[in-house]
């Protein structure tokens, strides 16, 4: 079972747009956003990846790291062979990892499975301590996501639990719950649906799946 306090590493068979493989453990101290995508997924191409590029362009790389993760659970061979041309065609500048295939028929890619992902596009958002604080499936509004990233930037690298809880409560009070607006994805998600939200019920939710508790400092 996924533990948001100690999330797994990205298990990648190759990386693009970076000189060396990237480990999440080496990014502690920064806020990290991972945009999970498939190359043929309309939501990934139209929303997820452009949003990741916008975030990368608007936040300092000293504070926020934005990564892409291609997790082909459909058309595996086609996506694997086409990744380099896809990255060039989409003019992606963020580092992009290719998830490791399980090697077994009908089994999910390794990182996709380790994070209990349900489809694409998805967003994984980690705080400065390396804890998984958000897990979204589908399109997320730019303002909402930018506010959540900024809140994690404001947290200190060794933020105590009470600081995290206070910031999460501010977010919950300031951001409108997307459930109230009948949020939908226009059929553009490619899925196998779900969102992790960590804490004591104070932070804002999303309209996919379950909420999970996090006892190690997240609100």
Image (spheres, rainbow, N blue to C red):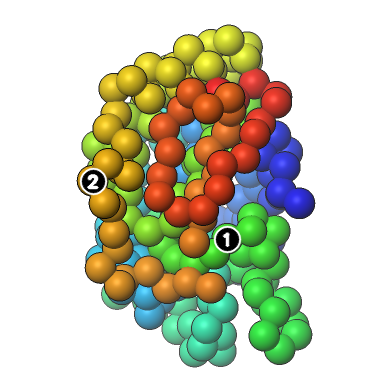
Residue at image mark 1:
117
| Residue 201, placed above or below residue 22 | above
Classify 10 Å Cα crowding around label 2: few (below 14), some (14-19), many (20 and above): few
Q: Nearer the viewer, residue 187 or 90?
A: 187
Residue at image mark 2:
181
Q: Nearer the viewer, residue 88 or 107?
A: 107
| Residue 200, placed above or below residue 31 | above
Mark on residue 104?
Answer: none
Which image quadrant for residue 10?
bottom right
Q: Is residue 214 left or right of residue 183?
A: right
- The percent position of residue 198, horizontal first and vertical second, equals 57, 33
Q: Nearer the viewer, residue 38 or 211?
A: 211
Q: Nearer the viewer, residue 14 or 165?
A: 165
**Residue 161: in sight, yes or no?**
yes
Which image quadrant for residue 98?
bottom right
Q: Is residue 201 left or right of residue 84?
A: right
- The percent position of residue 190, horizontal first and vertical second, equals 42, 73
- The percent position of residue 214, horizontal first and vertical second, equals 66, 31
**Residue 51: in sight, yes or no?**
no
Classify 10 Å Cα crowding around label 1: few (below 14), some (14-19), many (20 and above): many
| Residue 119, placed above or below residue 146 | below
| Residue 143, placed above or below residue 201 | below
Which image quadrant for residue 71?
bottom right
Q: Are marks 2 and 1 in contact (CB under 8 Å)?
A: no
Mark 2 residue element: helix
Label 2 to label 1: alpha-carbon separation? 24 Å
- Residue at 58% across, 10% down: 162
């Amino acid at each position: 079972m996924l533990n948001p306090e100690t999330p797994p590493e990205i298990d990648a068979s190759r990386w693009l747009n970076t000189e060396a493989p990237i480990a999440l453990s080496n990014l502690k101290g920064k806020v990290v956003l991972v945009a999970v995508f498939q190359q043929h997924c309309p939501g990934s191409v139209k929303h997820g990846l452009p949003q990741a590029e916008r975030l990368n362009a608007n936040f300092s790389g000293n504070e926020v790291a934005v990564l892409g993760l291609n997790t082909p659970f459909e058309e595996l061979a086609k996506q694997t062979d086409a990744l380099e041309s896809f990255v060039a065609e989409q003019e992606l500048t963020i580092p992009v990892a290719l998830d490791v295939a399980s090697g077994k028929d009908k089994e999910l890619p390794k990182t996709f499975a380790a994070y209990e992902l349900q489809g694409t596009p998805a967003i994984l958002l980690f705080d400065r301590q390396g804890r998984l604080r958000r897990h979204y499936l589908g399109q997320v509004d730019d303002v909402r996501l930018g506010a959540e990233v900024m809140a994690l930037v404001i947290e200190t690298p060794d933020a105590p639990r009470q600081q995290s809880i206070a910031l999460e409560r501010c977010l919950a009070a300031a951001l409108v719950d997307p459930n109230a607006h009948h949020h939908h994805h226009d059929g553009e998600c490619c899925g196998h649906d779900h969102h992790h939200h960590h804490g004591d019920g104070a932070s804002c939710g999303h309209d996919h799946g379950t909420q999970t508790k996090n006892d190690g400092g997240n609100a």
